[in-house]
């Protein structure tokens, strides 16, 4: 794929990070040509609203129905731009945002949900530590290790409550982190996201009929009393399922299943699966076999499970 991106009003620092991001896209067979936009032909426009040239280009692009991605003004979290880029994001994050825009797929993206959950979806698989902040709440996302770090235990429930608020900021953790000695609270990223998504299950978009399968067993150490999370994990490790099929086969509430899928997608434990790995028909599921596996996992955590057949 060859793409021409026009830029307008970008500072030298933003232009450099955008250039690095476009270089990273070559690994995905997306070859990008950057050019200073003066009204000519471009596949998409990247503008900085903080500059007069960027604002003018944005208005022209809107009149021409030209796809545009915006670097908003610093601190602007309310203007409803269709597509925006975090002006403080590292090049790898900008590259992922561009790829989502240039190669839309059926997989969930950070555009489907807002806030901290959207950041986690976008950054799943990131190998570097990320600093995420919202007001007085600050956290370190360590996707590679499946951990989340905070400076106080109280930050965890506060972050859960604000999971979908669109005022979260994300950036690479500074090399000389002034709070390096204060990140004393470490929790499983999966457990945090499962608890948070359960709180917001009524607000999460439905994943419906798409097929998913666990790429690895999630760290459920912080949700050992959630029997349904253990049961869903066991089934999704065996083969691919859709949220609809899981609800029909297990009798677990559909919104609860949807929340679990969003949480494990955001942690990187769950992945979209092709139809060849699809789950068996609902009526053919061998519940006793599944229950046996779940019971072994449950015994490991000291739980006693009981099931009722639908």
Image (cartoon, rainbow, N blue to C red):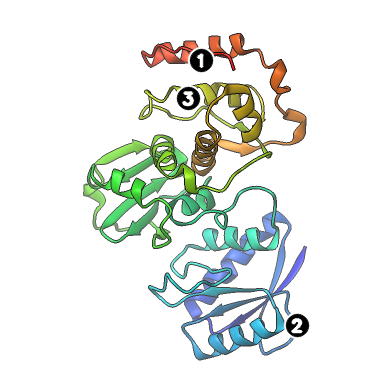
Secondary structure found at label 3: helix
Residue 66 in percent (x, y) is at 70, 78
On screen, residue 64 versus residue 309, left or right, reads right
For the N terminus, give its image quadrant. Answer: bottom right
Between disc 2 and disc 1, the foreground one is 1
Q: Which residue is mark 3?
A: 228
On screen, residue 88 versus residue 255, left or right, reads left
Secondary structure found at label 1: helix
Which residue is drawn at the image coordinates 50% and 34% (left, top)? 256
Q: What whole-number distance in Å separates the C-alpha atoms at marks 2 and 1? A: 57 Å
Quarter of the rendering containing residue 220:
top left
Between disc 1 and disc 3, the foreground one is 3
Q: Which residue is mark 1?
A: 294
Visible in this render: residue 123?
Answer: yes
Residue 287 in percent (x, y) is at 61, 13
Residue 144 in percent (x, y) is at 46, 41
Other-residue count near label 2 (Cα within 10 Å), few / some / many at <14 / 14–19 / ≥20: few
Q: Which residue is mark 2?
A: 41
On screen, residue 140 versus residue 87, left or right, reads left
């Amino acid at each position: 794929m060859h793409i021409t991106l026009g830029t307008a009003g970008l500072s030298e620092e933003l232009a450099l990070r955008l250039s690095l991001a476009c270089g990273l896209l070559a690994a995905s067979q997306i070859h990008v040509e950057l050019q200073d936009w003066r009204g000519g032909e471009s596949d998409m426009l990247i503008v900085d609203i903080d500059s007069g040239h960027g604002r003018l280009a944005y208005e022209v692009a809107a009149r021409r129905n030209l796809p545009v991605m915006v670097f908003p003004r610093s601190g602007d979290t309310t203007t409803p731009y269709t597509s925006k880029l975090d002006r403080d994001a590292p090049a790898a994050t900008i590259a992922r945002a561009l790829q989502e825009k240039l190669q839309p797929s059926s997989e969930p993206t950070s555009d489907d949900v807002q806030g901290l959950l959207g950041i986690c979806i976008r950054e799943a698989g990131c190998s570097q530590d990320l600093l995420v902040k919202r007001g007085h709440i600050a956290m370190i996302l360590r996707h590679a290790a499946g951990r989340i770090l905070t400076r106080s235990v109280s930050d965890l429930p506060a972050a859960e409550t604000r999971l979908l608020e669109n005022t979260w900021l994300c950036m690479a953790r500074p090399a000389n982190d002034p709070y390096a000695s204060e990140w004393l609270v470490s929790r499983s990223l999966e457990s945090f996201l499962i608890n948070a998504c359960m709180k917001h299950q009524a607000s999460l978009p439905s994943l419906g009929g798409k097929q998913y399968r666990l790429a690895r067993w999630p760290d459920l150490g912080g949700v050992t009393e959630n029997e349904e999370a253990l049961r869903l994990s066991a089934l999704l490790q065996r083969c691919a399922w859709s949220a609809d099929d899981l609800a029909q086969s297990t009798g677990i509430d559909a919104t609860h299943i949807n929340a679990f899928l969003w949480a494990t997608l955001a942690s990187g434990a769950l992945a979209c699966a092709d139809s060849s790995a699809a789950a068996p028909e609902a009526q053919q599921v061998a519940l006793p076999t599944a229950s046996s596996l779940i019971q072994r996992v449950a015994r490991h955590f000291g739980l006693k499970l009981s099931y009722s057949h639908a």
